[in-house]
Amino acid sequence: MGKVIHEISNIMDKDFKAELLHGTHTIYNGKTSDEGFTTIIPSSIGKTWAYHDTEQEAMQAVNNFKSKKQQIWSLKQLTDDYCSNNPWTYSGT
Protein backbone atom coordinates (compact mmCIF):
# COMPACT_ATOMS: atom_id res chain seq x y z
CA MET A 1 0.00 0.00 0.00
CA GLY A 2 1.24 3.52 -0.84
CA LYS A 3 2.18 6.28 1.55
CA VAL A 4 -0.60 8.68 2.55
CA ILE A 5 0.29 12.06 1.08
CA HIS A 6 -2.38 14.03 2.89
CA GLU A 7 -5.29 13.37 5.17
CA ILE A 8 -8.45 15.43 5.18
CA SER A 9 -10.01 16.12 8.54
CA ASN A 10 -13.79 15.90 8.47
CA ILE A 11 -13.91 17.61 11.85
CA MET A 12 -14.22 21.33 11.25
CA ASP A 13 -12.75 23.98 13.50
CA LYS A 14 -15.35 25.54 15.76
CA ASP A 15 -14.38 28.92 14.29
CA PHE A 16 -15.13 27.81 10.72
CA LYS A 17 -18.41 29.69 10.51
CA ALA A 18 -19.93 32.67 8.76
CA GLU A 19 -20.63 35.84 10.70
CA LEU A 20 -23.27 38.49 10.01
CA LEU A 21 -22.79 41.86 11.69
CA HIS A 22 -25.13 44.85 11.68
CA GLY A 23 -23.37 47.92 10.32
CA THR A 24 -20.17 48.45 8.39
CA HIS A 25 -17.15 46.72 9.92
CA THR A 26 -13.56 46.60 8.73
CA ILE A 27 -10.69 44.31 9.65
CA TYR A 28 -8.54 47.05 11.15
CA ASN A 29 -11.00 49.70 12.35
CA GLY A 30 -13.89 47.66 13.75
CA LYS A 31 -17.35 49.15 13.35
CA THR A 32 -17.29 52.31 11.26
CA SER A 33 -21.00 52.84 10.59
CA ASP A 34 -24.48 51.65 11.57
CA GLU A 35 -25.49 51.36 7.91
CA GLY A 36 -25.94 48.06 6.12
CA PHE A 37 -24.57 44.67 7.08
CA THR A 38 -21.16 43.04 7.02
CA THR A 39 -20.54 39.34 6.44
CA ILE A 40 -17.32 37.53 7.29
CA ILE A 41 -17.21 34.31 5.27
CA PRO A 42 -14.43 31.69 5.57
CA SER A 43 -12.74 30.55 2.38
CA SER A 44 -10.04 28.04 1.56
CA ILE A 45 -7.33 30.68 2.13
CA GLY A 46 -8.73 32.99 4.79
CA LYS A 47 -11.86 35.06 5.25
CA THR A 48 -13.80 37.38 2.98
CA TRP A 49 -15.31 40.53 4.47
CA ALA A 50 -18.22 41.89 2.42
CA TYR A 51 -20.64 44.80 2.79
CA HIS A 52 -24.35 44.34 1.99
CA ASP A 53 -27.04 46.99 1.69
CA THR A 54 -29.80 44.75 3.03
CA GLU A 55 -30.12 41.96 5.57
CA GLN A 56 -31.58 39.76 2.82
CA GLU A 57 -28.40 40.10 0.72
CA ALA A 58 -26.26 39.35 3.78
CA MET A 59 -28.32 36.28 4.67
CA GLN A 60 -28.04 35.04 1.09
CA ALA A 61 -24.23 35.15 1.41
CA VAL A 62 -24.36 33.30 4.75
CA ASN A 63 -26.74 30.66 3.40
CA ASN A 64 -24.56 30.19 0.31
CA PHE A 65 -21.60 29.50 2.61
CA LYS A 66 -23.65 27.06 4.71
CA SER A 67 -24.68 25.09 1.62
CA LYS A 68 -21.03 24.74 0.52
CA LYS A 69 -19.37 24.58 3.94
CA GLN A 70 -18.10 20.99 3.64
CA GLN A 71 -16.64 21.63 0.17
CA ILE A 72 -14.91 24.79 1.35
CA TRP A 73 -13.54 22.99 4.43
CA SER A 74 -12.15 20.17 2.27
CA LEU A 75 -10.50 22.64 -0.10
CA LYS A 76 -9.05 24.53 2.89
CA GLN A 77 -7.55 21.29 4.23
CA LEU A 78 -5.99 20.48 0.84
CA THR A 79 -4.62 24.02 0.53
CA ASP A 80 -3.14 23.93 4.04
CA ASP A 81 -1.59 20.52 3.39
CA TYR A 82 -0.07 21.64 0.08
CA CYS A 83 1.31 24.84 1.58
CA SER A 84 2.78 23.11 4.62
CA ASN A 85 4.65 20.72 2.30
CA ASN A 86 5.87 23.44 -0.07
CA PRO A 87 7.74 26.13 1.86
CA TRP A 88 7.79 28.54 -1.08
CA THR A 89 4.03 29.12 -0.67
CA TYR A 90 2.48 31.58 1.75
CA SER A 91 -1.13 30.41 1.97
CA GLY A 92 -2.12 28.49 5.05
CA THR A 93 0.73 29.77 7.15
Image (spheres, rainbow, N blue to C red):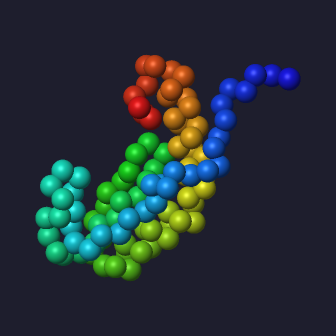
Quadrant for the C terminus, please: top left
Could you tell me which residue is drawn at 56 percent across and 32 percent down?
81
Percent position (x, y) of residue 23?
A: 22, 72
Instruction: Tell me: 92 left or right of 33.
Output: right
Q: 72 above or below 40?
A: above
Could you tell me which residue is drawn at 43 percent across and 62 percent down?
18
Instruction: Tell me: 5 left or right of 81.
Output: right
Instruction: Tell me: 51 left or right of 87.
Output: left
Displayed quadrant of residue 89: top left
Could you tell me which residue is drawn at 15 percent across and 55 percent down?
29
Could you tell me which residue is drawn at 65 percent across and 49 percent down?
10
Quadrant for the N terminus, please: top right
Point out the residue furthest to the right here.
1
Percent position (x, y) of residue 12?
A: 56, 52
Residue in front for this viewpoint, 92 or 54: 92
Q: 32 above or below 8?
A: below
